[in-house]
Amino acid sequence: MLFILAVCLLCGFCACASKKIDENASPKNILNAALTVLGMNDRGLIYLSETDNDFEMLDDGLLSGKYGELLDAPTVSQMEKYALFFAYDSYGTEIGIFCMKTPEYADAMKTFVENRKQRLLDNAVNYPDLDTTIVSSLVVKVDGVWVYYIMSDGNDIAIPEIEKLLYK
């Protein structure tokens, strides 16, 4: 029995060790895969760093409004590439995939995302009929210079899709 447990643990450690970021991963493709599995492709606003005439690019004002406070906010110049989705519904699904320029920027972006969640929950206190289940579900992960987050009612199916394309 102890031998079986040891083998399982060893296999688990080996699986984690072989999981490497695909440096050529496309935030746009990752976002599209997550939106497809959630059935949300046409139910929100999309922002992409990759050229695409159908979608907008981020600017520092939008980043400050979504993730920052006054002068403390992430900037587009800290990002190599990104893809974001904001559902049309207030307090609805959000997905963000960021490849930051440095691990320090990635850690800071994680903090900005966590602070966004807290601000949304704090603001919802004034609206007792507002359902904050999706906001409460927020998961944010950092791996090197990559940051990804999702808040949806389908995190359990979307996160594996994100990771399938982010990791080799």
Image: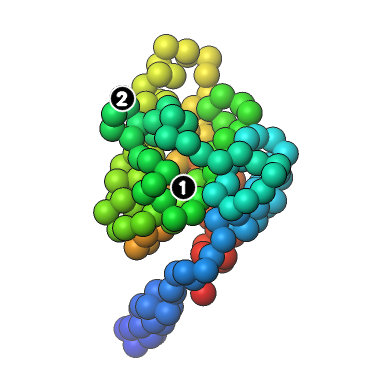
Labelled disc at residue 90: none
**Left or right: 101, with 57 as reference point:** left
* Quadrant in which residue 109 is drawn: top left
Residue type of the residue flagged with mark 2: Leu
Hey, which residue is sitting farthest bottom in the picture? 3
- The one nearer the camera, 133 or 40, is 40
Image x and y of residue 110, in percent = 35, 46
Q: Where residue 70 is drawn, which disc sits there? A: 2
Could you tell whether 91 is left or right of 67 in the image? Answer: right
Can residue 34 be seen from the camera position used here?
A: no
Indicate the secondary structure of the residue bearing disc 2: loop
- Above or below, comparing residue 33 to residue 152 in the picture: below
Residue 67 shows in the view: yes
**Cα distance between the residues tagged 1 and 2:** 22 Å
Which residue appears at 59% of the width and 53% of the height? 50
Quarter of the image with the N terminus in it:
bottom left
Q: Is disc 2 surrounded by few (<14), some (14 to 19) or many (20+) residues within 10 Å?
A: few
Residue at (31% x, 42% y) in the render? 111
Q: Position of residue 124 (x, y in %)?
A: 44, 19
Residue 7, image x and y in percent?
A: 38, 85
Residue under numbered circle 1? 149
- Against 20, residue 90 (above or below) is above
- Asked if 143 appears above or below 123 in the picture, the reply is below
Q: Amino acid at mark 1?
A: Tyr
Which residue is nearer to you in this view: 167 or 155? 167
Instruction: Indicate which disc, 1 or 2, sits on the residue closer to the N terminus.
Output: 2
For marks 1 and 2, give the one nearer the viewer. 2
Q: Residue at x 37, y 26 (%)?
A: 119
Residue nearest the observer in this picture, 55 or 108: 55
Residue 88, image x, y percentages = 63, 28
Q: Are marks 1 and 2 in contact (CB under 8 Å)?
A: no
